Amino acid sequence: MHAGRNYTLKEVLTWTRRDIIKLLIIAAIPTAFYELLHWKWMTLPWLPIALIGTAVAFLVGFKNNATYDRLWEARQIWGGIVNSSRTWGIMVKDFITNKHALSPLSGAELLQIHRQMIYRHVAWLTALRFQLREARVWENLKKNYNLEYRNFYSIPEHETKLEDELTPFLSSEEKAYILNKKNRATQLIGLQSKELRELLEKGLIEDFRHMEMQAILKEFYEHQGKCERIKNFPYPRQFATLNLYFVWLFILLLPFGMLQEFEKLGDHFVWLTVPFSALVSWVFHTMEKIGEATENPFEGTPNDIPMAALSRTIEIDLREMLEETKLPEAVKPVNNILM
């Protein structure tokens, strides 16, 4: 997520510089043939091109609205995860007590149970964000313009290993168990449910509190499922593909429609076709790329959900509930990019 006031001109040009070169070449070739070789037949009426441009503008707007909805839904889901996590923390701390215990535990033993369940929840956050950062064939992170932009930031889930990240929060037995599963996040919630049942049998929580805490686990599954739906179901390929084709059709036709328009201004004004055609094409193509960059809010581009930062915020909040003082620092933006 970009956490600054705006993208700098340098960043925008770095992201689109290959496109700018292509668009200048596309505009320069017909202009040179028209002016230098006097191929006057290389013109098209402006009206049909303008109609195509209008249609393309509507299609680009539709795509950008749809992909923005995917991004905003993902942010709402993680906002729900933050709120549900805090609720889980106070329930663990205040619901698990000796009030109905068959064999009362010491304060240190209760605190250990609280810590284990809260730490296991942080492990769930960690496993979930690692799963959501896994690549899919339709994602765009490996495209040249995104790879170049990676010089401005790093993706935490790509810099470390899941097993190392889980070590502080799980016992060796639980970590080994979880790493052997395909959907680690799902199984971690399962471990939480198993422990709640054991606590119920020991009388450390009573039926009503058990049901309330199980309801929170159900919320976590719902949040996770919504994230997986966005992750595993791409923006429909028919819309993405044809939208791209239509944008390029407009870009390729545009200079042929501008040739006669600029020639009307006088001798040699036809060369203005090159910069103006490239400029208009750049606007349409960049808007298409913005929609593309918003399609997959979990892949790890600068416009995606800052899952590492949100997870760290939750971790700090929950560990403060345990009265811990040695807390990790909040994740900070690097070059205005928060991951």
Image: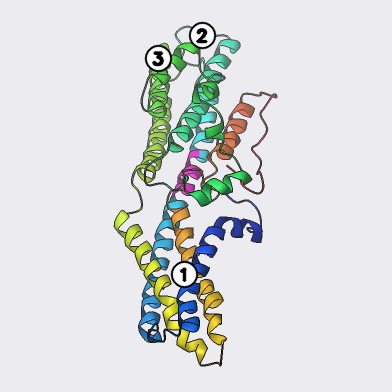
- Can the viewer see residue 8? no
Residue 151: give x, y in percent of width and height: 61, 44
Q: Is residue 234 above or below residue 252?
A: above
The 10 Å Cα crowd at callout 3, few under 14, some 14 to 19, many 20 or more, is few
- Quarter of the rendering containing residue 331: top right
Mark 3: which amino acid? Answer: Glu
- Judging by the rendered image, the residue that carries numbered circle 3 is 198
SS label for mark 2: loop
* In this rendering, the label closer to the viewer, 2 or 3: 3
Q: State the residue position of label 2.
A: 104
Q: Quadrant of the C terminus?
A: top right
Q: Earlier in the sequence, mark 1 or mark 3?
A: 1
On the image, the x and y values in percent for residue 285 come to 47, 65
146 and 220: which one is in front?
Answer: 146
Mark 1 = which residue? 26
The picture places residue 42, in percent across and down from the top left corner, at 39, 82
Element at label 3 = helix
**Residue sitting nearer the eye, 9 or 338:** 9
**Mark 1: few, some, or many residues within 10 Å (few <14, many ≥20)?**
many
- In the image, farthest residue toward the top: 103
Q: Quadrant of residue 153?
A: top right
Circle 1: element type: helix
Mark 1 or 3, closer to the camera: 1
Marks 2 and 3, how far apart in space? 14 Å
Find the magenta span and give its range: 74-81
Residue drawn at (51%, 89%) of the image? 263
Closer-to-camera residue (10/62):
10
Whether tag 2 and tag 3 are in contact, CB under 8 A, the answer is: no
How far apart are the two marked residues, 1 and 3, measured between alpha carbons? 69 Å
Q: Please, what is the three-letter code of the amino acid marked with disc 2?
A: Pro
